[in-house]
Image (cartoon, helix red, strand yellow):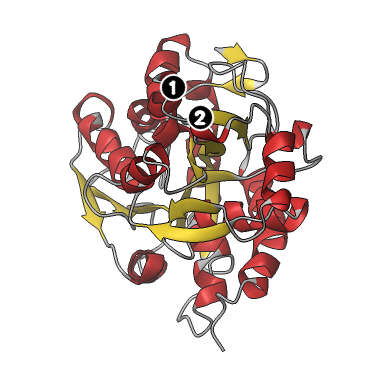
């Protein structure tokens, strides 16, 4: 299904992307168990995607799929394990935006290079950020909130996930591009931030669309903007941040990668299957529940996309003092 430029795909169907790749030929892969490495702990976004892939293994691969959770070090543990794996197609890796634009900027002495040591297979899903405020603020637009913050310098605070998280970077990009006078307060997760927002202790919150949609539908949060390139098909009444701040875009994302030097025929075939799966109409509702949106990309386009994202976010990592010396 294509809706206003988006292809919709839930993580559960990602499993269908993988079974038709080939090492020796189209009919041979996989001939043994496959590992999928995720940087997330159990229940995290990357883990959910990987485990839903594994659940489909019997129907598609008829091979065991082993989920390898490697949390720790802000993604370092997972990337190190994936980069050291044999490039035979039997180890795959689902990194996130933080692995490419935050981890290398914060930890400079890494034993791997995210672009050099991995082959990008394709784009899995993007998760747009959302900016919301307490209804008690009495503002109905992003422009009105920015103006209010400037009239009340030093008095308004915004919640986002821990310092150095992608929601935090989104909030700082928003501050830098609008001169909004809001101060960051770190929270361990969206639920804690929402509780303080509803209690009037926080004026604004920045989190993913998936984390905030329930609260916005329940009128606990007034959504002022989604940070996607265009309005979301399932939330058409919420304007984009870019309608107020031209060019503003902040989306988390997952890509499918493998160690460098994986045979090109595997990369091509897996990418082709991904792009076919993207358009399947029956996956739309599951995707909407995840707050994730898939765009078809080839391997080269995925690599270009990541490079473009690095140019946006790496300077911000340095500007707000996250980068290590």
* Crowd rating for badge 1 (residues with CA inside 10 Å; few <14, some 14–19, many 20+): few
Viewer-proximal residue among 39 and 23: 39
The answer to whether residue 186 shows anywhere in this view is yes
Q: Nearer the viewer, mark 1 or mark 2?
A: 2
- Image vertical order of residue 234 relative to residue 138, above or below: above
Q: Secondary structure at mark 2?
A: helix
Residue 147 spot, x, y in % from top left: 74, 43
Q: Which residue is mark 2?
A: 135
Residue extending farthest bottom: 325
Viewer-proximal residue among 299 and 306: 306
Between the C-alphas of marks 1 and 2, the distance is: 8 Å
| Contact flag, marks 1 and 2 (Cβ < 8 Å) | yes
Residue 165 spot, x, y in % from top left: 47, 59
Which numbered circle lies on residue 219?
A: 1
Sequence-wise, the earlier of marks 1 and 2 is 2
Quick check: 139 left or right of 214? right
Quick check: 306 left or right of 259? right
* Crowd rating for badge 2 (residues with CA inside 10 Å; few <14, some 14–19, many 20+): some
Q: Residue at x 62, y 58 (%)?
A: 172
**Quadrant of the snapshot with the N terminus:** top right
Viewer-proximal residue among 254 and 24: 254
The answer to whether residue 307 shows anywhere in this view is no
Residue 318 spot, x, y in % from top left: 64, 74
Q: Residue at x 72, y 61 (%)?
A: 311
Which numbered circle lies on residue 90?
A: none
Q: Residue at x 61, y 22 (%)?
A: 238
């Amino acid at each position: 299904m294509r809706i206003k430029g988006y292809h919709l795909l839930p993580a559960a169907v990602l499993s269908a992307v993988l079974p038709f790749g080939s090492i020796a030929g189209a009919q041979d892969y996989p001939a043994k168990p496959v590992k999928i490495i995720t940087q997330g702990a159990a229940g995290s976004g990357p883990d959910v995607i990987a485990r839903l892939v594994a659940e489909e293994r019997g129907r598609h691969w008829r091979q065991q799929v082993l989920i390898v959770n490697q949390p720790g070090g802000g993604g370092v543990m997972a990337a190190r394990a994936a980069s050291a794996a044999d490039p035979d197609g039997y180890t795959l890796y689902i990194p996130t935006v933080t692995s490419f634009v935050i981890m290398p900027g914060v930890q400079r002495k890494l034993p791997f290079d995210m672009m050099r040591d991995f082959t990008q297979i394709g784009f899995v899903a993007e998760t747009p950020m959302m900016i919301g405020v307490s209804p008690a603020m009495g503002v109905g637009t992003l422009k009105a909130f920015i103006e209010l913050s400037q009239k009340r310098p030093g008095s308004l605070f915004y919640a986002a996930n821990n310092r150095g998280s992608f929601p935090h970077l989104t909030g700082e990009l928003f501050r830098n591009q609008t001169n909004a006078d809001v101060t960051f307060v770190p929270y361990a997760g969206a639920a804690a931030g929402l509780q303080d927002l509803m209690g009037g202790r926080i004026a604004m919150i920045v989190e993913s669309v998936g984390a905030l949609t329930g609260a916005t539908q329940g009128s606990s949060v007034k959504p002022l903007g989604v940070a996607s390139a265009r309005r979301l098909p399932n939330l058409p009444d919420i304007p984009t941040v870019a309608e107020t701040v031209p060019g503003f875009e902040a989306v988390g994302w997952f890509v499918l990668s493998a160690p460098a030097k994986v045979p090109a025929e595997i990369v091509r075939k897996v990418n082709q299957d991904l792009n076919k799966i993207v358009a399947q109409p029956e996956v739309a509702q599951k995707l909407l529940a995840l707050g994730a949106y898939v765009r078809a990309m080839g391997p080269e386009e995925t690599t270009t996309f990541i490079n473009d994202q690095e140019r946006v976010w790496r300077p911000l990592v340095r500007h707000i003092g996250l980068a290590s010396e």
